[in-house]
Amino acid sequence: MKVKLYNYSNMKIINRLKKVNINFLVAGSALFVSVCALFLSIQEVRIMRSQQKASMYPYITIGKSYNARGFGIQMKNSGNGLAKINSYQIYNDSMHFKDWFDVLQTLAPDAKNINYNVISTDGNIRDKMISPGENVNLITLKWTSETRKLEGLFNTLKVKVSYSSLLDEQWTVQEGVPNQIDEKPTLEPAKEFDYSN
């Protein structure tokens, strides 16, 4: 009797398998494989976008520089991507400066021999593209008796630079370190350094 039941159970399973359409199994398997492939493609696109973003990430830093010839303020792109300078401000606790001579007249009004022979600068950097690894000389002053007195006052200067990447991500550098921001800041001509319409 057990043998008959066993055979009867096997027959039931075989009959059910015969009733299942083989085409339906193949179609279901193909649908499952397609959904898995779609999921993997979406994940791959996400990973590629994050890699693309990382390869285009600029990192601007600003700091003081000193050497045997003089001192100054330097900007460097230590990142992997180009940085477009959108805004450039130099100020202290009381005012925003218009240009380097405005800075020098305010900090050292009695200085008579600080001129283009003593000053070196890369000029206006607004709308300039800074390449990865590029150093920009915001200002360098050669050592003279007048610039030695001025050097201590340069520590009161603050530099604020806003820049964007090629992917239109925005950063602002203050205190020498970049912070990512949500949107491009509005240009304020009265506060901008070396600004001309």
Image (tube, rainbow, N blue to C red):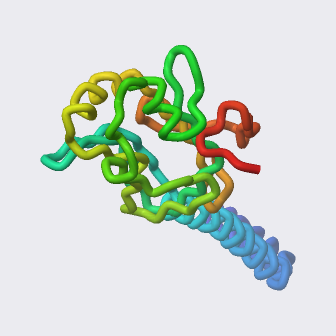
Q: Residue at x 59, y 67 (%)?
A: 44
In the image, 114 versus 36, the foreground residue is 114
Depicted 172 relative to depicted 6: above or below: above
Q: Residue 97 placed where, x, y %?
A: 57, 31
Q: Residue 50 placed where, x, y %?
A: 56, 58
Q: Residue 29 placed where, x, y %?
A: 73, 75
Q: Is residue 193 visible?
A: yes
Q: Is residue 196 left or right of residue 66?
A: right
In the image, 128 versus 49, the foreground residue is 128
Q: Is residue 7 visible?
A: no
Direction front: furthest residue: 112
Q: Residue at x 84, y 76 (%)?
A: 20
Direction bottom: furthest residue: 23
Q: Residue 77 placed where, x, y %?
A: 42, 54
In the image, 162 versus 195, the foreground residue is 195
Q: Is residue 191 left or right of residue 112?
A: right
Give the number of callouts: 0
Depicted 81 relative to depicted 160: above or below: below
Q: Residue at x 35, y 34 (%)?
A: 112
Q: Is residue 9 left or right of residue 104?
A: right
Q: Residue at x 73, y 37 (%)?
A: 189
Direction left: furthest residue: 68
Which quadrant of the figure contains the N terminus?
A: bottom right
Instruction: Tell me where residue 187 sits by quadrant.
Output: top right
In the image, 11 versus 56, the foreground residue is 56
